[in-house]
Image: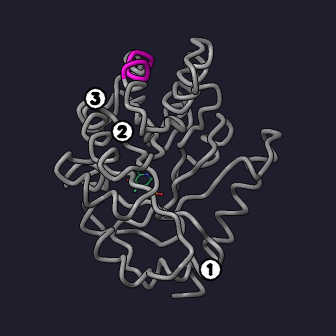
Amino acid sequence: MNEMIISNLKEVHNRIEAACKLSGRNTNDVQLLLATKTVPADKIKIAIEAGETLMGENKMQELRDKDFDLKGLNIERHFIGHLQTNKIKDVLKYVSCIQSLDRLNLAQELDKQLQKEGRNLDVFIQVNTSFEESKFGLPPHEVISFIREIKKYGTLKIKGLMTIGLLDVEKEKMLPSLRLLREIRDDIYNAKIEGTGDLKLSMGMSQDLELAIAEGSNLVRIGTSIFGNRFLGKDIWNENIAE
Ligand SMILES: *Cc1c(COP(=O)(O)O)cnc(C)c1O
């Protein structure tokens, strides 16, 4: 089992490297985040001990359950799932970044709590670039006004945009939702909103990693290709949707 995770990790790094090479990008510009939902702490530990430094969880419960077993390890944690406002305080105990900021009242409540704690937080704005109803994220046309609106929440440091691309067996179907995130980033850049000149793109999962890197991803979130299939016969997006 350990060897499996180690060799899978190598394979994923090889894929990242090859994709960077193909599009003339520097491997250092693409970070790997371990997407660890449903993965038990002992397996995550193997990846961390192999040198990984970044993981993402989708649920408060899992962050808490695994925290003890991951204590003392050098790992940065991001929240990548749908966040309910009543979980904010708990989630903030564990994470340095929330990649799933997708609505104003969440920004407002986060800011309120962060002010209380006297700290800032990195955030990515989640955008629904696949236009699938089952997915969270702001509609693409609302992103710029959203950014202008949340500038007033000084504790939130906008680091980039996040999307869950449309997954399909055909590349041609997966590409548009990834490309759209890059275009939104470029629109924001052209709008010259202070502090948004260097936004990163968090996109690319096991299935669309190469495409995402070709479209400019700076952070790929990989679960299945490293830890294996989570479960059979259940829609994986339940994990991103339900709390
Ligand atoms: C599960 C998940 C991933 C990883 O997906 P895989 O297909 O297992 O690589 C990435 N991002 C989010 C938000 C997820 O929920």
Which range is magenta? 144-149
Pointer 1 and pointer 2: residues touching (CB < 8 Å)?
no
* 30 magenta-colored: no
Q: Is residue 168 left or right of residue 85?
A: right
Examine the rendered structure and indicate whether residue 194 appears above or below residue 49. Answer: above
* Residue on which the image places disc 3: 104
Please name the amino acid that badge 3 sits on.
Answer: Leu
Q: Is residue 83 left or right of residue 128?
A: left
Examine the rendered structure and indicate whether residue 17 appears above or below residue 232. Answer: above
The span from disc 1 to disc 3 (Cα, nearest Å) is 40 Å
Q: Main secondary structure of the magenta part?
A: helix
Rendering coords of residue 69 (x, y %): 39, 84
Q: Which mark is residue 168?
A: none
**Rendered residue at 42%/28% (across/down):** 129
Q: Is residue 51 left or right of residue 156?
A: right
* Residue on which the image places disc 2: 101
Examine the rendered structure and indicate whether residue 194 appears above or below residue 191. Answer: below
Q: Which mark is residue 6?
A: 1
* 148 magenta-colored: yes
**Rendered residue at 33%/34% (across/down):** 102
Tell me which image quadrant ligand 1 sits in: bottom left
Quadrant of the image occupied by residue 36? bottom left
Question: Quick one: 71 or 43, which is closer to the camera?
Answer: 71
Instruction: Classify mark 2: helix, strand or loop.
Output: strand
Q: Earlier in the sequence, mark 1 or mark 3?
A: 1
Rendering coords of residue 184 (x, y %): 53, 21
Quadrant of the image occupied by residue 7? bottom right
Examine the rendered structure and indicate whether residue 22 appears above or below residue 77. Answer: above
Instruction: Classify mark 3: helix, strand or loop.
Output: helix
Q: Is mark 1 within 8 Å of ligand 1?
A: no
Instruction: Classify mark 1: helix, strand or loop.
Output: helix
Question: Quick one: 155 or 216, which is closer to the camera?
Answer: 155
